[in-house]
Amino acid sequence: MTEARIECLCPEYHVGDLRLRMRRGSVVWVSEEAARASSDLRIAVRSGAVAVLYTRRCSVSRLPPPPAARMGSILRSAGVASRARPEPSAPSVGAASVSPGDIEAAVAAGVSRAITDLVASGVLVPAGTAAARPTAAPASTAAVIDASDPVYIPTNIVPADGVPSITVAQSSSGGSDIDAAAAALKATRRRKSTEPK
Amino acid sequence: MSKTADNTVPGVGIDIGTMNIVSARRGGKGVDTRRVRDAFLDLDPSAKRMLKLSGVDFFDRNGELLIVGDKALEIANVFGKEARRPLSQGLLAAGEIDALEVLGLLIKQVLGSPSVQDEVCYYSVPAAPVDAPDRDVIYHRGVLGRIVTECGFRAVASNEAMAVVFNETAADGFSGVGISFGSGMTNVALAVNTIEGMSFSVARGGDWVDAGAAKAVGSTQARMCALKEGGIDLTQPVGREQEALAVYYKSLIEYTLDNITAQFARVRGQFAVPRPIPIVIAGGTSLAGGFLEFFNQVLDTRRKRIPFDVSEVRHAKDPLGSIAHGLLLQAMQEHE
């Protein structure tokens, strides 16, 4: 299903007919029909306040590493295939009957597919296998992957350790200009927020 | 309001460009700026001894020697090679996977570590190029945001030309046109009272000037770049090569001004400029000798077509660092 990904590019913006109040950097997904029908959104795009991308969200999203408990339940569920599962209610007259063995086989196949997907995405590492690249972010960075980020953005780009030294040119300039500009910007924004609408 | 150990307002701005990466942070004695060339060079392992003897920093990546930063350009000349750049025409090339690790390394060195928890880092992103619709900025913005986040900051993307407006037009009520003439592209933004009315980019910059002038006179891009940086007066070029450079500079400025007119026409119904506003110029490409006077000469031929009144044209106080400073200004607001 195609949806509209709306990203706010200005400090703050209100899209009235969609009832969205957005701040810079925030991303909201709305249905394509609602986005195309919104005249306020059209004005926002033309003025450059927001950017809209009509796309289909990827069905496989990168989830944070599951906690130990969840990982345990995933592993346990892989062995569920042999356990007795509640049988479905008896089919109505005329429908083909399904044996408990067929149901167990179908559940086992589904769990196996799910685990394969988790391994392929790097969330789950098979026992005895070293991960090709560390998937957990270093504790100091506390990286949080936004669920709205496209999946193809790579992770672990910045080397965590063993960073070689690089010569960087450094200079210092007086801070009075930037302090004055910061004060003026703050005053301008405060004035705008207190102006009657 | 949180403060750093120097008792200053936290926040950092970083301008990630095709030629340079520049960061700005409010320090105890003023604004601390750090800069590094956005380039790297890969060499054969046999060059290791020579690099050690010359004291050049390098690192080994999967059996390949990599030199990054300013030294990459210097050593490239020695070996007769071309330094590689993670960005092309202002944007990340989706196919340059190798370059991502280098870019992450360069940005980490320039940014340093956060001075407070959850410190905000405003990083520059260009506007989508109007003359290259197949190049979007979504991947570029996403990757840079991921790198800055992995460096430990709260990443916020901001238009690079708007950063020029914020840094240079405080006395004009944060109203004006900011033009960043970069190496890979030229970015433009127009704002009135901090409200962005229009922003766009064109896929022409210093590299385009160098390539065009080199082709015109049968020279090399590197030679044109050296001529440009070594001393030229665009208003009085001497010799074929300087004249070629002047011709391409004129074309770049005309192209930018024509696009300002065209793009403003699209937003005219929704945005008004009630008073004369300044044009502020930044970016490394604008450092060529006589650029400001040259720009004014070209503007005079097109002034009537510009759909708003221009109060003056001026250079940014620090054309190379203005974007980083403007981003720092915005980042500091988040902590106040």
Image (cartoon, rainbow, N blue to C red):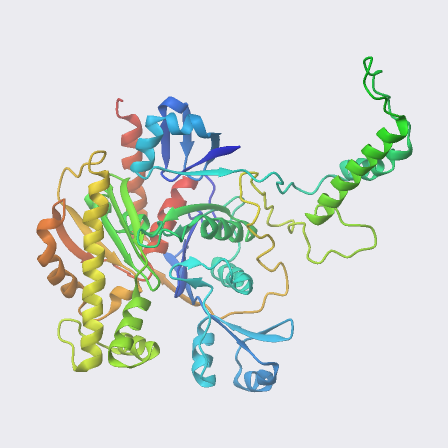
Residue lying at the far front in this picture: please name it. Answer: A94
Q: Horizontal placement of B266 versus B147: left or right?
A: left
Number of numbered discs: 0
**Nearer to us in this view, B136 or B187:** B136
**Quadrant position of the N terminus of chain B in the picture:** top left
Between residue B19 and residue A33, name the one nearer to us: A33
Where in the figure is residue B134, as x and y percent of width and height? Answer: 39, 52
| Residue A183 vertical position relative to residue B315 in the rendered view, above or below | above
Viewer-proximal residue among A98 and A123: A98
Task: Measuring from the top left, give residue B26's x and y in whole percent.
Answer: 40, 53
| Position above or below: A86 against B264 | above
Task: Give residue B87's quadrant in the image.
Answer: bottom left
Say if residue B9 shows up in the picture: no
Residue B315: x %, y % from top left? 21, 59
Quadrant of the image occupied by residue A96 = top right
Residue drawn at the location 36% of the way across and 52% of the way down: B126
Residue drawn 38% across and 41% down? Answer: B333
